[in-house]
Image (cartoon, rainbow, N blue to C red):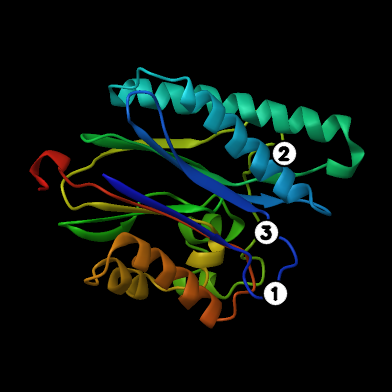
Amino acid sequence: MKAVFRTDRGKIRQHNEDNGGIFINPEGVRFAVVADGMGGHRAGDVASSMTVEHIHNTWNETVSVNTPQEAESWLREKIEHVNRKIFEHSEQNSEYQGMGTTIVAAICTDKFATIANIGDSRCYLNNESGFKQVTEDHSLVNELVRSGQITREDAEHHPRKNVLVRALGTEKNVDMDISTIVFEEGDVLLLCSDGLSNKVSEKEMVEIITAETNLEEKADSFIELANLYGGEDNITLVLVQFYDESESG
């Protein structure tokens, strides 16, 4: 399995409030995460960095995540815990009041990938069946699309596109979506903040992912394209590709 993490401030923002990474536990299982912080002055980067740091530290101590059930339980427990930590921190520090973050995270084994998300950071899967978005955005416009009030095309240019209906750390309790997919030879996962998905079309994502380039070059191409199209937001992504290491060389 190969994995690459990239984050970029973009061309407009003064600070990068995104965070993320790829972490490996003592058993060699990879954990990928992207968090897009939000809030007042520098509060967003506090929320996203608290999230990634806490989950990184707990993943380093985790040894047994061998089934989808164990992976789903781990994600639910740890994300709920960090939600409380962020919420309490914002309650105790007025300058951080109302801060929060999105999260999309994946535990990637050589048999399955278990994915959790809150907010509008996304996970996509490219496999032999094609390219598809695995997660649902927890956003106002996606609720309008799901209820049939607007079309997906309308949603792309909606003035309230960035309004979230769910985020990590903004309330004492949080709901998250968790699902498990089969992860097979050649499959690629893309986790990203909306700084990428708002700029790069799914057609362009497919072209980059299926190009005859290595994973690092694909990641750089995503950042370059989002910046070429304006780079108004921070851009963060993780690419995870599964291949059988026992058959390579």
| Residue 17, position as x, y percentages in the image | 68, 54
- Could you tell me how far apart the alpha carbons at marks 2 and 1 are, in whole angstroms? 26 Å
Question: Which residue position holds label 3?
Answer: 16
| SS category of the residue bearing label 1 | loop
Name the element at disc 3: loop
Q: Position of residue 94 (x, y in %)?
A: 91, 39
Residue for point 38% across, 23% down: 26
Amino acid tagged 3: Asn
Total numbered circles:
3
User: Which disc, if any, is residue 170?
Assistant: 2
Give the image location of residue 5, x and y in percent: 45, 53
Q: Nearer the viewer, residue 160 or 168?
A: 168
Image position of 217 (left or right of 137): left
Q: Name the amino acid type tagged 2.
A: Thr
Q: Which kind of residue does numbered mark 1 sit on?
A: Ile
Report whether 165 appears left or right of 112. Answer: right
Residue under label 1, please give it. 12
Please give the label number shown on residue 201.
none
Q: Which residue is at 9% across, 48% downward?
A: 249
Q: Position of residue 193 (x, y in %)?
A: 53, 57
